[in-house]
Image (cartoon, grey):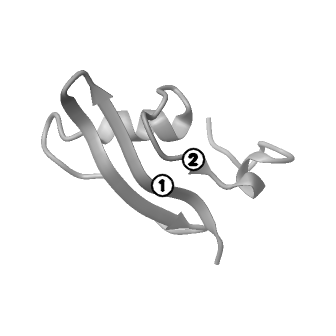
Amino acid sequence: MSKVVEVENLVKRYGSLAAVDGVTFSVEEGEVFGVLGPNGAGKTTTVEMIEGLRKPDSAPSGFSESTLSGSRSGLRN
């Protein structure tokens, strides 16, 4: 299987607060993946950076090229 989401050493800071500090993971095609943690752990910030809604302070992250190229019919609304 191929990786459809890959995040490596993702960082997001708000002033001196590290909301996301060095998160690394990948999701394979067909895999079910969840993000768990307490309030304020950076789950929403991490997902928003992958979606492109927030800009990470370091590290490229997001979907593989093959996921976003061509038809978007395979993506859910």
Residue at left offset 53%, top offset 58%: 6
Q: Is residue 40 left or right of residue 13?
A: left
Residue 44, percent across and down?
33, 35
Residue 66 occupies which quadrant of the picture?
bottom right
Residue at left offset 58%, top offset 68%: 30
The image quadrant where one finds the C terminus is top right
Badge 2: few (under 14), some or many (20 or more) residues near its Cα, within 10 Å?
Answer: some
Please name whichever residue, 75 or 68, is drawn nearer the observer in this view of the structure.
68
Q: Is residue 63 left or right of residue 12?
A: right
Residue 35, percent across and down?
31, 52
Residue at left offset 50%, top offset 64%: 27
The image quadrant where one finds the N terminus is bottom right
Residue position for label 1: 7
Please name whichever residue, 76 or 37, is drawn nearer the observer in this view of the structure.
37
Residue 42 lies, with reference to residue 36, above or below; the image says: above
**In the rendered structure, which amino acid carries the disc numbered 1?**
Val
Residue 24 lies, with reference to residue 39, above or below; the image says: below
Residue 57, percent across and down?
42, 34
Q: Secondary structure at mark 1?
A: strand
Mark positioned earlier in the residue sequence (1 or 2): 1
Residue 29 lies, with reference to residue 76, above or below; the image says: below
**In the rendered structure, which amino acid carries the disc numbered 2?**
Gly
Residue 72 in sight here:
yes
Q: Is residue 16 left or right of residue 47?
A: left
Cβ atoms at labels 1 and 2 below 8 Å apart: yes
Residue at left offset 86%, top offset 47%: 70
Please name whichever residue, 54 or 33, is drawn nearer the observer in this view of the structure.
54
Residue position for label 2: 62
Question: For the view shown, which residue lies furthest in the left direction?
Answer: 38
